Image (spheres, rainbow, N blue to C red):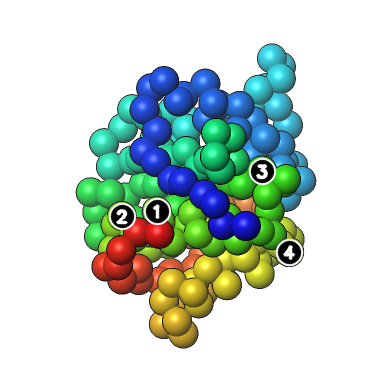
């Protein structure tokens, strides 16, 4: 199953992305230990930035009429794009939708890319290495970097690759 559409999210999509963001942050809390705020929501600084700050872009991933994920890109005005947040709902994971979506997002901005993940997230480790290989062949690198402001967490793993200019899926 690779029936995924990736489109730039507009303000009308924000409530949908906010709900997907909560699911994403809930998944990531298993690796960061971050708890929801007293109102039951998670910090959403990156989501807010994607809708309001220059150099950011929010994307909604859909399969047919169903929202299935999100992608937040930053660094659009710099030399390297960063896939700041990426999420696919559990019901469509391991179907090829995630890889197809990343390829579509990266194709919009050919050139250098980076993405971070946590080594403890075993599924993410395999996924991001496969993505880098699918997008850039063997021409990608991996390094560990400390999490800014979180010395209590293990370092993030960062993958760097270059997305070629190609037709979008």
The answer to whether mark 2 and mark 1 are in CB contact below 8 A is yes
Q: Position of residue 86 (x, y in %)?
A: 54, 48
Question: Which of the two discs, 4 and 1, labels the residue nearer the N terminus?
Answer: 1
Q: Residues within 10 Å of mark 4 (few under 14, many from 20)?
A: few
Measuring 45% from the left and 53% from the top, which residue is drawn there? 83
Quadrant of the rendered image containing residue 39: top right
Circle 3: element type: loop
Which circle marks residue 89 in the picture?
3
Circle 4 sits on which residue? 122
Which circle marks residue 108 in the picture?
2
Q: Residues within 10 Å of mark 1 (few under 14, many from 20)?
A: many
Vertical placement of residue 39 versus 148, above or below: above
Q: Position of residue 168 (x, y in %)?
A: 35, 59
Vertical placement of residue 41 versus 84, above or below: above
Q: Position of residue 72 (x, y in %)?
A: 44, 43
Question: Which of the two discs, 4 and 3, labels the residue nearer the N terminus?
Answer: 3
């Amino acid at each position: 199953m690779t029936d995924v559409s990736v489109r730039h999210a507009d303000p009308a999509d924000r409530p949908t992305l906010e709900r997907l963001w909560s699911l994403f942050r809930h998944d990531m809390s298993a690796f960061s230990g971050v708890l929801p705020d007293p109102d039951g929501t998670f910090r959403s600084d990156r989501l807010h930035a994607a809708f309001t700050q220059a150099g950011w872009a929010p994307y909604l991933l859909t399969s047919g009429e169903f929202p299935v994920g999100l992608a937040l890109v930053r660094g659009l005005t710099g030399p390297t794009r960063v896939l700041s947040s990426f999420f696919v709902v559990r019901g469509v994971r391991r179907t090829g939708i995630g890889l197809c979506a990343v390829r579509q997002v990266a194709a919009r901005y050919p050139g250098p890319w980076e993405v971070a993940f946590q080594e403890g997230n075993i599924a993410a480790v395999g996924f991001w290495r496969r993505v880098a290989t699918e997008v850039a062949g063997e021409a990608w690198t991996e390094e560990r970097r400390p999490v800014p402001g979180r010395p209590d967490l293990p370092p993030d793993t960062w993958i760097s690759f270059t997305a070629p200019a190609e037709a979008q899926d």
